[in-house]
Image: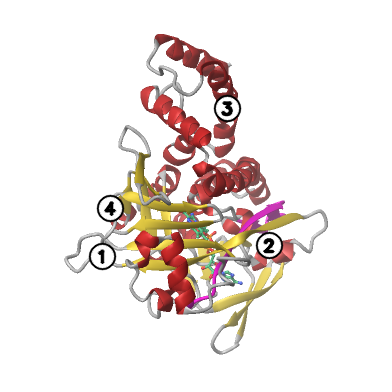
Amino acid sequence: MNRSLVIGGGLVGSLIAIHLARRGHEVDIFERHPDFRIEADTKRPALNLTLCERGLRALGEVGLRERVEALAAPAHGRSIHGEDGFTAYQPYGAHGEAIHSIARSELNETLINLAEGLPGIAFHFGQKCTHLDLATPSARFEDVRTGAITEIKPDRIFGADGAYSTVRLHLQKLERFNYSQQYLSQGYKSLKIPARADGMPVLESGSLHVWPRGQRMLIGFPNRNASVSLSLLLPFDGAHSFASLTTADELRSFFHAWFPDVAELIPGLAEQFFARPPNSLLTVRCAPWSYEDKVLLVGDAAHAILPSYGQGANAGFDDCSVFVQCMDEYGDDWRSVFRAFEARRRPSMDYMADLCVEHFVELCELVADPNFLKRKELERRLNDLYPDLYQSLYTMVTFTTTPYIEAMRIEHRQRKFMDRLIADEGYDLDVESPRIKELLLRLSHEEIA
Ligand SMILES: Cc1cc2nc3c(=O)[nH]c(=O)nc-3n(C[C@H](O)[C@H](O)[C@H](O)COP(=O)(O)OP(=O)(O)OC[C@H]3O[C@@H](n4cnc5c(N)ncnc54)[C@H](O)[C@@H]3O)c2cc1C
């Protein structure tokens, strides 16, 4: 019997536990927070996520795709709310592409419910990991209510304890363990716009709503019940920041100045805003992700990325799919399983970490740059007209399961191609002309070669 210990009962911990149990492992999952299905979790921010093709495919491998899609609200495009009060709608594609917005808690609950029903899995809530002995391996937990200590000695440990991982902290003490973390100067708070009294949505449904304001941004995620979950991103310090907003009056003035069309849509704005401190956003890179054949990091614990591409959870679910492939290939040779997993996933996640930082700057600063917008529009038209010959990076990341690193290689060629095309012909070229198709055909042959 393989005895696996999963530390962290979040999205990735629950999914990897399901895979392990389905392969006959005895799995214990220790989660720091009490069971939020029984008592509301006031410590974690309420958050909506968007799932895309790679995350949904991974959920499909354990039979959850349809169930999760039924809980989620599809968004077929972005509604960009400009400072001038006008809204521009940008569809994600011409072929019905959509991302799926869902509350993180609802997604987590779906995964926990499935996991809990499987033979061999036991959840232990309210148990915080405080210490690890990597060599044994063993882990110590403190009951968050009683302070009682439990020690577990499994065959191997999976660190699925998120961006601030305790498991990773213990790996960091090893020689030649590489680690970097980079905080964003902005943080976020979650707010909510309820549905209208007649049950209809206040903001157009079927769309992700974005109010880009430089370093400040508001993002609205649709929900099935017609409400909208908002993430407000602001600098931590300085003018018009979280630190500067200390009273209800200041908050109201701020909203009327920066997001006037939303201010009146959020009931109890001040209560919602001041209920919790802002949360941080960070990028974490580390290596190696494993210790011998005993400990492995997965999900955010191995690779926390900024949410600018909406990929963290999708990538964590992708981890689980790749991990299963490695288990199938290497069987009980756990050292090889762990090494193969990292070799297949880390290059992609290192690239994604950079891309998300770059894309965050784009979202904050470049959406107001007319040339940037013209280029994006040109890419979108090429993507829509010739989906077999040209796929924008966003399309590859969001609507395909092409590994991120492969998407990057394709994008490098495409970027050079677009630079040349725009330099030669400007932005207003006739994308339907046979010559453009010919150029794209040549580009795709370069990719094959
Ligand atoms: C504002 C924001 C927006 C996002 N939007 C998206 C999006 O649109 N799409 C997307 O795919 N991703 C998105 N993400 C990222 C996504 O939330 C994460 O990538 C995902 O939750 C990672 O899952 P995980 O299981 O690895 O970690 P987590 O979800 O953080 O779960 C870790 C679990 O471990 C537990 N834990 C921590 N420490 C201990 C300990 N010492 N002992 C025991 N248990 C412990 C925690 O309580 C938690 O339950 C977003 C993130 C943020 C912050």
Which numbered disc flags the more N-terminal residue, 2 or 3? 2
Q: Are marks 4 and 3 in contact (CB under 8 Å)?
A: no
Label 2 residue SS: helix
Quarter where residue 136 is shown: bottom right
Q: Nearer the viewer, residue 415 or 378?
A: 378
Residue at the left extreme, as displayed = 198
At label 3, the amino acid type is: Arg
| In the image: residue 162, left or right of residue 122 | right
Q: Residue at x 54, y 22 (%)?
A: 422
**Number of other residues with Cα within 10 Å of mark 3, as a class: few under 14, some 14 to 19, many 20 or more:** some
Which numbered disc flags the more N-terminal residue, 1 or 3? 1
Q: Is residue 285 magenta?
A: yes
Which of discs 2 and 3 lies nearer the camera? The answer is 3
Which numbered disc flags the more N-terminal residue, 1 or 4? 1
**Number of other residues with Cα within 10 Å of mark 4, as a class: few under 14, some 14 to 19, many 20 or more:** many
Q: Are marks 2 and 3 in contact (CB under 8 Å)?
A: no
Q: Is residue 340 above or below residue 374?
A: below
At label 2, the amino acid type is: Arg
Label 3 residue SS: helix
At label 4, the amino acid type is: Ser
Which numbered disc flags the more N-terminal residue, 2 or 4? 2
| In the image: residue 391, left or right of residue 301 | left
- Return the x and y of residue 199 as percentages of the image width and height: 19, 64
What is the C-alpha distance between the residues marked 1 and 3? Answer: 42 Å
Which residues are the magenta region?
A: 274-297
- Residue that numbered label 3 is attached to: 415
What is the C-alpha distance between the residues marked 2 and 4? Answer: 40 Å
Q: Nearer the viewer, residue 258 or 98?
A: 258
Q: Which mark is residue 195?
A: 1
Q: Which mark is residue 168?
A: 2
